[in-house]
Image: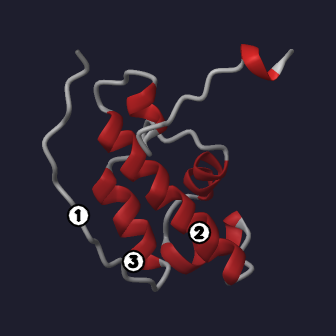
Amino acid sequence: MKSDDMELVRGSGNIYRDFGYLDADVRQLKSILAAQILKILERDELSVREAQRKTGIAAADFSRIRKVKLERFTIDRLLTIINKLGTRIDFRITARKERVAA
């Protein structure tokens, strides 16, 4: 492929929005929270079984998060898991009007 054949496309910063998901913002936030859970598990060197013992959350839930199967999780459930792992989350939210493509 020649470089002339390539088109540069700038993403929005939310891949779910780029692919047209109606719930793109929810999916993005759930992905960010799941990534934080994975970072905590890695930082604390916790297996899914150890995380279950520490939090009371089913090991299967941690396995689902590791496999990025987030359909069953709500945002508040993911936040609860983070809190039970002994971590608090600070949010910074920016709201801006969506630009509509012409």
Identify the mark at residue 14; answer none if there is no mark: none
Where is residue 67, by image quadrant? top right
Tell me: 10 left or right of 102.
Answer: right
What's the CA distance linking mark 2 and mark 1?
A: 31 Å
Image x and y of residue 18, in percent: 43, 28
* N-term mark: 2 or 1: 2
Depth order, front residue of 90/5: 5
Image location of residue 33, percent across then percent down = 45, 60
Which residue is pictured at 21% across the width and 60% down the height? 94
The residue drawn where x is 32% and y is 53% is 75
Residue at 28% from the left image edge and 72% from the top image edge: 91
At label 2, which amino acid type do we have? Gln
Mark number for residue 83?
3
Q: Position of residue 79 (x, y in %)?
A: 35, 66
In the image, is 71 to the left or to the right of 43?
left
Q: How is the image coloured?
A: secondary structure
Q: Nearer the viewer, residue 32 or 74?
A: 32
Q: Residue at x 51, y 57 (%)?
A: 34
* Horizontal relation, residue 85 to residue 21: left or right: right
Q: Quadrant of residue 69?
A: top right
Mark 1 is on which residue type? Ile
State the residue position of label 2.
52
